[in-house]
Image (cartoon, rainbow, N blue to C red):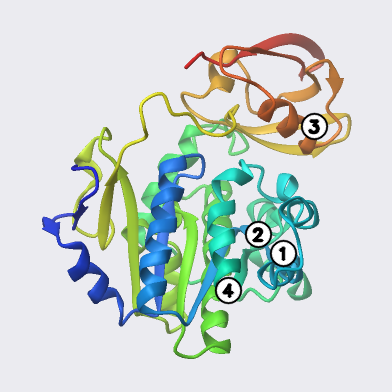
Amino acid sequence: MPVGAWVVPGGGSIDAGYLLAGLEASRVVLLGERHDRLEDHRWQLQMIAALHARRPDMVIGFEMFPRRVQPVLDRWVAGELGEQEFLRQSEWNKVWGYAPELYLPLLHFARMNRIPVVALNVEPEFTKKVTREGFDAVAPEKREGVSRPAPAPAGYVAKLFEIYLEHDRSKDGGKPTPQSPDFLRFVESQTTWDRAMAQGLAEALARRPGALAVGIVGGGHVVHDHGIPHQLADLGVREVKVLMPWDRGKDCGELVAGYADAVFGVQEPKGAATARPRLGVSIEAVEGGVAIRAVEKGSIAESTGLRAGDVILEIAGRPAVGTDDVRSAVQAMAPGTWLPMKIGRGSGTTEMVARFPAP
């Protein structure tokens, strides 16, 4: 994959000017990302600037914000908040947690050009309840205006099952199958998440007919038209394009027809690292600590020996009362340093040290 060039998966190279001209008739352009990759966000900024030059009537939707912080986004775009106050009022570390430096250039571009910014996400308690009990178990007044999602395409279900198997899930009483009730609720939760973001974009278009809606979202929600594009189509929005960055060192086996409308070759600069490190866990505050719900394959957490179901009791010598305590401790780590933790596992406790590799 050449750096700085566009390729149509399953097709071939495409001229940047020709690609941009083809986007002018779109109602939605989805810019996928890997959340912790700085080069992905630089590419997103480049794309927003290029699209804005052609379609100045624009709104930008961010996966990173739940709907309840929309007033804060409005005040940011209006120039009423500085960076630190914006991050505080939007509860950045609580609602997202990735380094704000990755996203602030995008937000500054929106403010500089007075482009409306739209919060696309919902509260995690909503999707977690769907995972536990199903969409129907969530009272209508607790759904944040999100309508029932369209059923997931078969290809999306297959991909979600791969992801499901990567995590330590034992509630099914054995090896799960695609028909396991827990997995089916997991699919329903993911499609609810996709639906929320699709609906946020569709509602933004309804408020500004003729505008271009740009979505800043994780790549897993957009590739193969499975997630957000599928839900947008169900909502009647079909003029949608999906663009993705592609690291030149990544195996190109996935670059098949239908992966995205086009991909752009990027390469993380030599020696570059994310602005802040990642442990590689999904966490949730519980009584007495912070529970680990899932551990990413190949992550620092996995190499440390952390498991789903563990409870972080202390981290960096301090009690882990909420998720912010864990995120703050991890984000303070420098490459080549060690992070001590006290872990509750079953009826006992154990001491562990996460080693953050040197660059």
The amino acid type, in three-letter code, at marker 4 is Gly
Whether residue 178 can be seen here = no
The residue that mark 3 highlights is 325
* Mark in the foreground, 2 or 1: 2
Determine the CA span between mark 2 and mark 4.
11 Å
Report crowding for label 2: few under 14, some 14 to 19, many 20 or more residues within 10 A (C-alpha).
many
Q: Is residue 206 left or right of residue 73?
A: left
Q: Earlier in the sequence, mark 2 or mark 3?
A: 2
- Number of marks present in the image shown: 4
Q: Earlier in the sequence, mark 2 or mark 4?
A: 2
* Mark in the foreground, 1 or 4: 4
Report crowding for label 4: few under 14, some 14 to 19, many 20 or more residues within 10 A (C-alpha).
many
Q: Nearer the viewer, residue 329 or 104?
A: 104
The amino acid type, in three-letter code, at marker 3 is Asp
Determine the CA span between mark 2 and mark 3.
20 Å
Q: Earlier in the sequence, mark 2 or mark 1?
A: 2
Residue 125 in the image, given as x and y percentages of width and height: 74, 55
The residue that mark 2 highlights is 65
Q: Which element is circle 2 on?
A: strand
* Mark in the foreground, 3 or 1: 3
Q: Is 48 above or below relative to 91?
A: below
The residue that mark 1 highlights is 137
The amino acid type, in three-letter code, at marker 2 is Phe
Determine the CA span between mark 3 and mark 4.
31 Å
Whether residue 42 can be seen here = yes
* Mark in the foreground, 2 or 4: 2
Q: Tell me the residue at 59%/52% (across/down).
A: 104
- Please identify the quadrant where the N terminus is shown: top left
